[in-house]
Each structure stands twice: as C-alpha cells, then as structure tokens.
Amino acid sequence: MGKKQAIEYVGFWERVWASVLDTVLFVFFTVPILYAIHGRDYFKCDVLQRGPVDFLNSVVLPSLVILLFWILCSATPGKMVVSARIVDAQTGGRPKFRQFAIRYLGYYVSLLFFGLGFFWVALSSRKQGWHDKLAGTVVVRRPRPESCQ
C-alpha cells in the first residue's frame, strides 16, 4: 500500500506562471468575441467598459469560468499545468462553493496596496495569499502517482 505523502504548498513563482497561462487563455478566447461584437475600433479607445455586453464578456463570464473550473477541477488550466490544486486549509479536501466564492472575491482584497495580498504568497509559510486566508484554502501540489516497484 502507499504511504501518506507530505503536503507540498505551491510557491509564488509557480502561481505567477499559472496566472500568466490563465491570462493568455482568457485573452485568446475573449479578444475574438470583443472584436466580433465591437470591431477593430474597440481596441483603439481608452474607455474600460462599453456597455452590458462588454461587461458580461470582460467581467461576468471570466468570473463564472474561473468558479466553474474551481468547482469541477479545484484548479484553473494554469494551475493544472503546474500540477497544483486548491484545497481546504483545514482538511486538505475539496473546498465548499462558499470558500471558492470568498476566494474569488478575495482577489479584489489581494489587489489592495499594489497587490500586496498576492505577494503575501511569497512570505507565508503555507504560501497563502490574502484571498486564500480569507477563504480558508491553500494551493498544493497534486500528488504524483506512485511508481510500481
């Protein structure tokens, strides 16, 4: 039988890399939609939001997609690439929907003071950002399958 593996928290730079990958995927899917709806001139203007369709595409849809990935996979595609997943900090099990919702809203708290809540991952012993602390979650390495011996 297998022996219990130690928890390995995923650190700051791997989480940055996962976020970069998620951002690239987000841009890859949303830019064509914005282009189709608004045309080329959309990208020449300094206005952040241009109505309800833009708000849905730029704010609501990404929020729902991220929450859906968290609920179904406990990770975004970027986290999956770096073999990471979000777990309950107390039990190590799957977080509840409430924790995922708090974690997502906690991203906005983590943005305060020039993103200090995200940089907190580098300072925390359990590699938790403020959003993780608020939600009671941690990001851990997915266990590697045991090799046959």
Image (cartoon, rainbow, N blue to C red):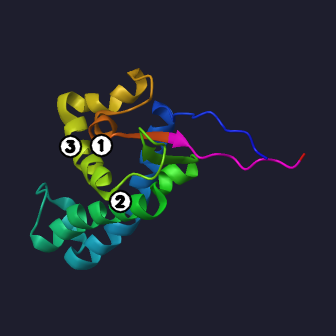
Q: Which label was assigned to residue 108?
A: 3
Residue 68: x %, y % from top left: 37, 65
Q: Which label was assigned to residue 135?
A: 1
Gap between marks 1 and 3, in whole Å? 13 Å
Q: Residue at 16% across / 74% down in the picture?
A: 53
Q: Residues within 10 Å of mark 2 (few under 14, many from 20)?
A: some
Q: Which residues are magenta?
A: 140-148
Q: What secondary structure is marked by label 1? A: helix
Q: Residue at 13% across / 56% down in the picture?
A: 48
Q: Residue at 57% across / 34% down in the picture?
A: 8
Residue 71: x %, y % from top left: 40, 61
Gap between marks 3 and 2, in whole Å? 14 Å
- The residue nearer to you, when weighing 26 against 86, is 86
Name the residue furthest right.
149
Q: For the residues labelled 3 and 2, say whether their Cβ atoms are less than 8 Å apart.
A: no
What is the magenta segment's predominant secondary structure? loop
Give the foreground label among 1 and 3: 1
Name the residue furthest bottom.
36
Mark with earlier residue (1, 3): 3
Q: Residue at 33% across / 67% down in the picture?
A: 30
Q: What secondary structure is marked by label 2? A: helix
* Residue 29, magenta (yes or no): no
Residue 79: x %, y % from top left: 50, 49
Mark with earlier residue (1, 2): 2
Left or right: residue 63 compared with residue 85: left
